[in-house]
Image (cartoon, grey):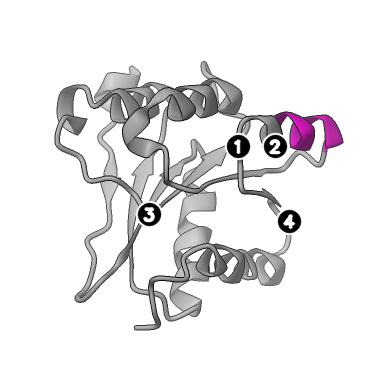
Amino acid sequence: MRESDVEPTLKPATTGSAARILVIEDNRSDVFLLDLALKKQDLRFELVHLATGGQALAFIRRQGAYTDAAVPDLILVDLHLSRYTGEDILREIRSANYLAGVPVCVWSSSQSRRDEALLKDLGVCQFITKPSGLDQFMEIGKAIKDLLPAHGAA
């Protein structure tokens, strides 16, 4: 399957001022768990899931289906994508003027201090290590909610 054959997954917001969270992640199970973790926080949110680096670059560059895409309130990037690295995506985000004020968070199964140092240089506001257990995964929702102080509970 080519990257262009994969449609982005959009989760519609409910009502009110929903936090728009862009998730660039090739593991659909992690996105499912993230959705559950955010729901557990009673956060009004719209989850925009891009499954490939190619989709992410098109979104950032406002190409194709993403020409009129809304600016997210937070961007969450998996550090280890296929074909493109999280570092590639982060550099592209930082070069897009319209995303200048958007906080960017990286999540990864990597616990490398080298990765964390590089990410700080790229302006990443938080590094979240993906946990292996479900209970610990649910705690990610709180960390993300804390990065979105303007959005209240549902």
**Dominant secondary structure of the residues highlighted in magenta in the image:** helix
- Identify the mark nearer the N-term, 2 or 3: 3
Pick the residue in front: 40 or 20.
20
Q: Which residues are magenta?
A: 112-118
Q: Secondary structure at mark 3?
A: loop
Residue type indicated by callout 2: Lys
Say which quarter of the image contains residue 18.
Answer: bottom left
Whole-Å distance between the Cαs marked 1 and 3? 16 Å
Residue type indicated by callout 4: Ser
- Identify the mark nearer the N-term, 4 or 3: 3
Whole-Å distance between the Cαs marked 4 and 1? 26 Å
Residue 123, disc: 1
Whole-Å distance between the Cαs marked 2 and 4? 24 Å
Q: Residue at x 45, y 22 (%)?
A: 92
Tell me the quadrant of the picture where the N terminus can be found: top left
Return the residue at label 3.
Answer: 73
Q: Is residue 153 above or below residue 66?
A: below
Mark 1–mark 3 CB contact (< 8 Å): no
Q: Secondary structure at mark 1?
A: loop
